[in-house]
Amino acid sequence: MSSAPIAIGSIAAYLSSATVVGWRMFHRELYPVNALRRTALGLGFLGLLLHTWLLYHAIFHHAGLDFAFFNALSLASWTVVASLLISSLNKPIENLGLVIMPLAALTVGLDLLYPTVGFMSEQASWILKLHVLLSMLAYSMLTLAAVQAVLLAVQDRALRRRKPNSFIRSLPPLMTMEALMFEMISVGFGLLTLALISGFAFLQNMFAQHLVHKTVLSVMAWLVFGGLLLGRRVWGWRGQKAIRWTLSGFGLLILAYFGSKFVLELILHR
C-alpha cells in the first residue's frame, strides 16, 4: 500500500485538529466547549494512528532501524503529539495542539518528500535502543514544556498590558499554566537524565563516533533545565526568568540532536 494517501490523511487530521483548537479558542462563546475539545482530540488521535502506520513502515526494516534525519524528525513529532494527546485526557493542555499539530503535519510531509536511509543495525545493543527511546521521550516532554513557555509568555504579556483577547481568556489561569510547564520540565529532566546515563554507557570514542557536539550540547541542556528546577525550588524562580531558561534549554537540545544530525547526514553525508 502506498504511503502517500496515509501521509496525506495524517496531515489532514493534524491540521483539522489544530483548526478546531484554534476555532474553539477564538470563538468559545459560540459553540459547546466540550464538544469542540472532543472533536479536536479525536482528530488528533486519528492523525496519530495514521502517523504510527507511516513510522512503522519507514523505520522498521529487515536490516535494522532506519533513524535517518527526516524519519527521526517524524518520530520526535510523533512522541510529542502522543504525549500531548494522552496528557490532554486529564489536563487542560490541548490548546498546545494549535502549535504542535501543524509542526507534526510538516514533519510527516517532509518525511514523505525526502526519504533517506541511516540504519541502526538489528545487532545494536539493547542499551543503545533504550537510549534512543529515552531521548525521544525526553525530547517530546521538553518540547511540550517549550511550547507551554511560549504560550505563557504571550499570556503574561497580554495580562500585563491588561488587554486579554478571546485567545488569552481561553487559556487556563497563569499559575496553572506555569505549574503545568514545570511539571513537564520535571518529567522531561528525569527522562533526559536517564537518556544521558544510557548514552554514556555505549559511548566509546566521542570524537571517532562524531558525537562530541551532541554530547556537549545535551549536557549543557541538562544543566540549564537542572538549574531552572533548582532555582524554582530554592529561589522561587518563575515568570519571564523561567520562560527564558526553558527556551534556552530547549534550544540547546534541538541543536544537540537535530543540529548535529542535519550536518552529518544532509551536509557531510556521513
Image (spheres, rainbow, N blue to C red):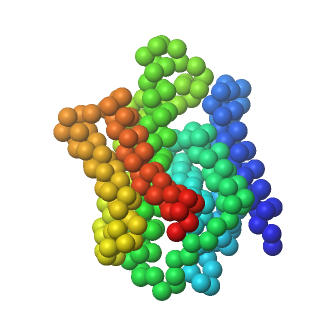
Q: Position of residue 34 (x, y in %)?
A: 64, 39
Name the quadrant of the N terminus. Answer: bottom right
- Apparent side of residue 13 relative to residue 219 in the rendered image (left or right): right
Q: Residue furthest left?
A: 234
Q: How many numbered dots are placed on residues in this image?
A: 0
Q: Which residue is at the front of the view, 222 or 28?
A: 222
- Apparent side of residue 148 relative to residue 8 in the rendered image (left or right): left
Q: Position of residue 128 (x, y in %)?
A: 41, 75
Q: Position of residue 12 (x, y in %)?
A: 75, 50
Against 158, is 79 above or below?
A: below
Against 234, is 141 above or below?
A: below
Q: In the figure, residue 63 lies in which quadrant?
A: bottom right
**Can residue 45 be spotted in the picture?**
no
Q: Residue furthest front?
A: 268
Against 142, is 128 above or below?
A: below
- Apparent side of residue 118 relative to residue 195 in the rendered image (left or right): right
Q: Residue at x 34, y 50 (%)?
A: 221
Q: Residue at x 52, y 84 (%)?
A: 122
Q: Which residue is at the front of the view, 89 or 74?
A: 74
Q: Residue at x 38, y 34 (%)?
A: 243
Q: Position of residue 260 (x, y in %)?
A: 46, 58
**Can residue 57 be spotted in the picture?**
yes
